[in-house]
Amino acid sequence: MKRHSSISLGVIGLGAVAFVLTFHPSRPLYMRHRSVDVVSADGSILAGTLSLPRWSRRPVPAVVVVHGSGRLTREHLRGDVRRLVWEDIGVLAYDKRGVGASAGTYPQGGGPGFEAALRLLAQDAAAAFAQLRREADVDSSRLGFFGASQASWIIPIAAQQLDPKPLFHIILSGAAVSTGVEEFYSRLTGDGVSTPEIADPVDVRAQVAAFTGPPGWDPAPTLRALRVPTLWLLGDLDQSVPTFATVQVLDSIRAAGNDSYSVIVYPAADHSLRHVRTRETAPLWRDIVSWLKGQGVLRDVST
C-alpha cells in the first residue's frame, strides 16, 4: 500500500446535462474554489484549495481529503473532489508536505521509521481539519475525513489529535491491519504490480494468519479507542490490502462494544474498487451518499 496513490474515481453516470457541468473546459461550473494555507504543527505551510458547491446558500458539510502514499498533490485528488462537491460536500485538499506548492520535508516511509512518517502526515491532516473548521462556508458540526489506501492509517491518528472529534470518516480500500502484515500480504500477492509469490488465495490467507514477522505500526488500538462513525469500502480481491484480515479486525472491535465501523465489501473488486474482469466501478458513491444521509451529514435541501 505504501506504493499506491489515493484512489481517484471521478464522476460517473451523471447523464448528459451533468456532463456539460462536470467537464467544463477549465473547471466544473458547479464548483467554486479558494486558496487556503494550512499551517502544520511544525510551522510548515501546506498549499490547499477549498472547493465548494457554487450555488449553495448555506454552510455545507465538508471533508478533508487525505492522500494515499506517494508524492501527491491536490491534482491527484481531482476526481474525488469533483464528485464530493457534486454531492453538495465541501472539500479541503492540499499538496503533501515537500510536494507541489507545500513547504516542509516529504517523509520517507518504510522500515522502522514508517510510524514516524505516518504521524507526521497525520499532524498535517489534523492541521487541515482545524483550518476547515474555521471556514465560514462550511458547517463546523458536519465535518469529516475522506481518504483511500494509506490514508486509513493516517486518519485515525489525526482524529485522535482533534477536539472535538470529526463527525464521520470515509475510508476506501483501507487497512485495519498492521503495517507489517500489509507489507507481508503485498509481497505474497505481488501488490497488483508484480508476479505473486503465492497464487492460491487460501494459502495466502493461511500465511497471513501465521505471520510472525515485525508487526510495524498497528492501528487496532487507535481504532478501538476512537468512536467516530466510519464507513469502510473494501474490495474483496484487493492485492494491496488484506481485506479479509481488515474485516476480522473491524469485526472484533465491534464485538467488543465499539459499533462505530460500517463495512461494505465489493465482490471481485480490486484496490481501485473496480471489478477485476469487467473494470466496472463498484457502486461506492451510491453507498457513500446513502450512509451519509443515515448519519445526518447530508440533509434534504427542503429541510
Image (cartoon, grey):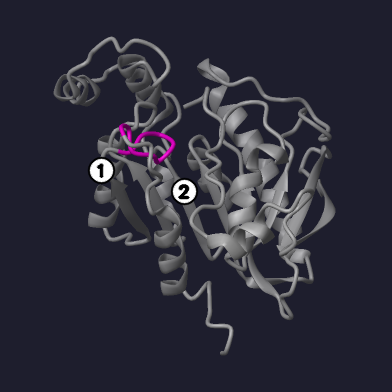
**Of the two numbered discs 1 and 2 in the rendering, the one whose residue sits closer to the viewer:** 1
Callout 1: SS: loop
Disc number at residue 208? none
Q: Which region is colored magenta?
A: 269-277
Residue drawn at point x = 57 percent, y = 89 percent: 302
Disc 1 + disc 2, Cβ < 8 Å: no
Report if residue 36 lies within the magenta region: no
Left or right of residue 162: residue 299:
left
Answer with mark 1 or mark 2, whichever residue precedes in sequence: 2
Residue drawn at point x = 60 percent, y = 28 percent: 116
Find the distance from the CA under tag 1 to the CA under tag 2.
Answer: 17 Å
Q: Residues within 10 Å of mark 2 (few under 14, many from 20)?
A: many
How many numbered markers are drawn? Answer: 2
Residue drawn at point x = 73 percent, y = 44 percent: 94
Q: Nearer the viewer, residue 178 or 193?
A: 193
Classify the position of the C terminus by image quarter: bottom right
Residue drawn at point x = 38 percent, y = 54 percent: 283
Report if residue 272 lies within the magenta region: yes
Q: Which amino acid, by three-letter code, is at mark 1?
A: Pro
Left or right of residue 20: residue 175:
left
Callout 2: SS: strand
The residue beneath circle 2 is: 171
The residue beneath circle 1 is: 267
Find residue 31 and report its horizontal and vertical position in percent.
73, 61
Left or right of residue 136: residue 176:
left
